[in-house]
Every structure is written in structure tokens, then in C-alpha cells.
Image: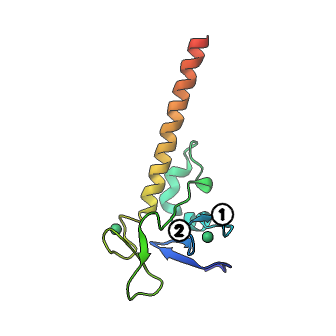
Amino acid sequence: MEEFAGPIIQVNGFVFCENHGDEWCHKCCYDHRMTNNIQIEDDLQDINDSMAYDIDDRGSFNVYAYGAVSAENKKNKFQCREHDKIDCKTCFDWIGFIKQQAKDAAGQEKWLTKRRKYYEAVEG
Ligand SMILES: [Zn+2]
Ligand SMILES: [Zn+2]
């Protein structure tokens, strides 16, 4: 594990700033996205090919926004509010969320291209 100046927490394989729950924390000036992306590198192969989505500059997750709370009786472990499950694969499905982001980005790109073509056609 690398040395970080601020406290971090680990939830379902991803690291976040403990104080704010951010992957990319502006307040702490840490960007853990790169570290986290490396964890799931193999799962991201197909996403890396997408032009519409930059994995290094993807949307940062806030683990507390996804319902992470300290697990009772277990130090440094976090569970979800919904299922009381440590490292819940449903609530903290980072790979799934990233794939969804990529899909949205691709959809957005498609829509923009379509719109551009429309305006080009209209303006002749
Ligand atoms: Zn922070
Ligand atoms: Zn859950």
C-alpha cells in the first residue's frame, strides 16, 4: 500500500478519503482513481477502447453517498446501509458503476453526433 498523508478507507477494493468519502478529494488533494482503476484493470479492457470515455478522468465516487457506514464490531470495515453487508457487491459495485458511466458517455456522444449531423443538414 502506498503512503497517503490523509486517512483512507477501503470499501469493496476501492480506496477513498476517510474524512469526506471521496475518491478524488479536492479538500485533501488526493486522487485515488488511478489506484482504484489499477485494481480492476482487467475488467476495464473493453472500456479503454471507447473514445467517449476517459477512464483516467472518470466521475469520482463518494463512498458515503453510496451508503457506506462503519461496520459494527469490525475495525476499518464498511458496510452498506441497505443490506448491512460489508463490502456489499450490489451497493459498491464499482465496476458496474464505471461501465454504466462509460455507457452513458457513449450514448451522449452518439446523441451529440446525431445532433451535429442534424444541424449540419439544416444549415446546409
Ligand atoms: Zn478528503
Ligand atoms: Zn448493499
Horizontal side, residue 117 vs residue 2: left or right: left
The type of residue carrying mark 1 is His
Q: Report the number of numbered marks.
A: 2
Residue highlighted by disc 2: 39
Spot occupied by residue 69 in the image (x, y as percentages of width and height): 42, 75
Is 11 left or right of 59, judged from the image as shown?
Answer: left
Most distant residue in the left direction: 83
Look at 52% across and 43% down and name the residue there: 105
Q: Residues within 10 Å of mark 2 (few under 14, many from 20)?
A: some
Residue 48 in the image: state x and y as whole percent.
56, 51
Quadrant location, the C terminus? top right
Q: Residue furthest top?
A: 124
For the residues labelled 2 and 1, the Cα–Cα distance comes to 22 Å
Question: What colouring does the structure picture have?
Answer: rainbow
Q: Amino acid at mark 2?
A: Gln
Judge: label 1 CB < 8 Å from ligand 1.
yes
Quadrant housing the N terminus: bottom right
Which residue lies under the disc numbered 1?
Answer: 26
User: In the picture, residue 33 is in which quadrant?
Assistant: bottom right
